[in-house]
Amino acid sequence: MLQRLLTSSANTALSRGRILATSRSRPLPESKSTHRNLRPSTIDSNGSRQIRWHGDGPGPDAPTVDLTFVNPDDSHTTISARVGETLLQTAHRTGIEMEGACEGVCACSTCHIILEQETYDELLDELEDGALSEDEEDMLDMAFGLTHTSRLGCQITVKENMGGSKFTLPKATRNFYVDGHKPTPH
């Protein structure tokens, strides 16, 4: 019994060693930036170059576009959004009342927003298969005040062609953690 256990442990260690050796032999992705907002380039399914920000989004030197949020009280707030950040990150950075209880990992519906039809259609056309992800659809099913142009703010990346777009915040959110609790970003 002990011999079989030792042999099994040795084989597992050998397998782990092979996995580590393989992962160490892969080249690291190239990065032209050494600060914390790394911008590795990737190629999407259409063959066009996409930039994916890591960490807390693009830095203060990123290009900006003006976006308007319609608040639950029907007042309008126009802000400068950084290209490459999500609408949730934009809202948190600029003080817009968008909750984001899951901190942007598509695990709640508290960053639910309502888009104008034209903006919704443009964003849908840019998606890989022309449809929302199954995760986003599942979370939207729990959203308060769902409409046919509803999206999650954590799933929309600000792009240069979005300048002048308007996003409506619903009158309420459904937070299963604690209603009224608004987490602050790190």
Image (cartoon, rainbow, N blue to C red):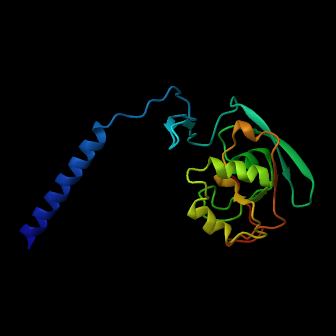
Name the residue at 62% across, 62% down.
136
Q: Quadrant of residue 144?
A: bottom right
Frontmost residue, 13 versus 44: 44
Q: From the image, which quarter does the N terminus lie in?
A: bottom left
What x and y, as percent, mark residue 20?
A: 27, 46
What x and y, as percent, mark residue 162?
A: 75, 41
Indicate whether 25 appears above or below 1.
Answer: above
Indicate whether 137 appears above or below 85.
Answer: below
Report if residue 186 is visible in the image: no
Left or right: 11 with respect to 64? left
Frontmost residue, 127 versus 83: 127
What x and y, as percent, mark residue 106?
A: 60, 60
Name the residue at 60% across, 50% down.
127
Left or right: 26 with respect to 30? left
Frontmost residue, 16 versus 53: 53
Q: Quadrant of residue 163?
A: top right
Left or right: 117 with respect to 131? right
Report if residue 70 is visible in the image: yes
Left or right: 125 with respect to 3? right
Q: Quadrant of residue 48?
A: top right
Label tally: 0
Indicate whether 62 appears above or below 174.
Answer: above
What x and y, as percent, mark residue 33?
A: 53, 27
Furthest residue toward top:
32
Indicate whether 42 appears above or below 168.
Answer: above
Name the residue at 14% across, 58% down.
11
